[in-house]
Image (cartoon, grey):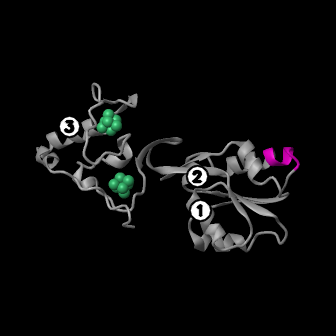
């Protein structure tokens, strides 16, 4: 699940300030589950834009907006005349569209992270898509995402009663890693220093 959040309407309006005829494209997959880019949100944004005097000339929710095969089919239905596109999907979906057309495209959402779905609209940040997964060395818990300092050799020393020093409501990732490794009888893994991550591997 790619988790997105809506940009404020004021920011969206500023982005398309110089354009009048707008196409709105949502996504029936992650953005619908996030309540940022489904049918409801597309219609809500359409109304908001029209109330500000903009002309929304076409709207659609593509089943999976990051699937270029579906995007290609949708583009064929676009009206001939329009000024720009507002994408209500994640950045990947928006670029699936922008890679196929030359018209200006703007994001109506911000893309945050990959997460797990606890309930509809309630997600937990799990992965920052770093390009080379190392959770096997950390008892299946991602230190990059879950530790506030992304420490590969933790803990930092600020943890208090299992909570992170940056946020008392947040579990210390390194406490979780320690507890899990202890349970697995693999604490010796923490004896070795972990080299800095090679961020260039994609
Ligand atoms: S190490 Fe963390 S951020 Fe990188 S791919 Fe694995 S879960 Fe995602
Ligand atoms: S208290 Fe724990 S989670 Fe917070 S920054 Fe330190 S090691 Fe990371």
> Could you tell me which secondary element the residue under label 3 belongs to?
helix
Q: Dot 2, how many residues are within 10 Å of its Cα: few (below 14), some (14-19), or many (20+)?
A: many
Element assignment for label 2: helix
| Badge nearest the viewer, 3 or 2 | 3
Q: Is residue 135 left or right of residue 146?
A: left
> What range is drawn magenta here?
48-53
Q: Residue furthest right?
A: 53
Q: CA distance from mark 3 to mark 2?
A: 35 Å
Using the image, tell me which numbered label, if any, was put on residue 7: none
Q: Which residue in the structure is indicated by mark 2? A: 31
Residue sitting at 27 percent across and 39 percent down? 174
Q: Position of residue 153 (x, y in %)?
A: 25, 46
Q: Quadrant of residue 83?
A: bottom right
Q: Are marks 1 and 2 in contact (CB under 8 Å)?
A: yes
Mark earlier in primary sequence (3, 2): 2
Label 1 and label 3: CA atoms lie apart by: 38 Å
Left or right: residue 50 versus residue 111 is: right
Q: Which residue is mark 1?
A: 93
Percent position (x, y) of residue 9? 73, 43
Q: Quadrant of the C terminus?
A: bottom left
């Amino acid at each position: 699940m790619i988790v997105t959040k809506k940009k404020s309407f004021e920011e969206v309006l500023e982005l398309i300030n110089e354009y009048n005829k707008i196409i709105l494209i949502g996504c029936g997959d992650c953005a619908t589950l996030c309540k940022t880019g489904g049918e409801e949100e597309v219609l809500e944004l359409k109304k908001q834009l029209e109330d500000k005097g903009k002309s929304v000339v076409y709207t659609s929710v593509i089943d999976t907006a990051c699937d270029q095969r579906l995007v290609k089919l949708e583009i064929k239905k676009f009206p001939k005349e329009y000024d720009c596109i507002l994408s209500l999907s994640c950045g990947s979906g928006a670029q699936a569209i922008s890679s196929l057309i030359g018209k200006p495209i703007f994001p109506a959402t911000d893309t945050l992270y990959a997460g797990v779905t606890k309930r509809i609209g309630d997600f937990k940040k799990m992965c920052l898509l770093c390009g080379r997964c190392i959770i096997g060395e950390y008892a299946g818990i991602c230190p990059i995402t879950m530790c506030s300092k992304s420490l590969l050799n933790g803990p930092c020393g600020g943890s208090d009663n299992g909570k992170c020093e940056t946020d008392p409501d947040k579990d210390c990732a390194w406490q979780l890693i320690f507890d899990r490794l202890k349970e697995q009888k693999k604490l010796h893994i923490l004896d070795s220093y972990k080299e800095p991550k090679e961020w260039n591997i994609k």
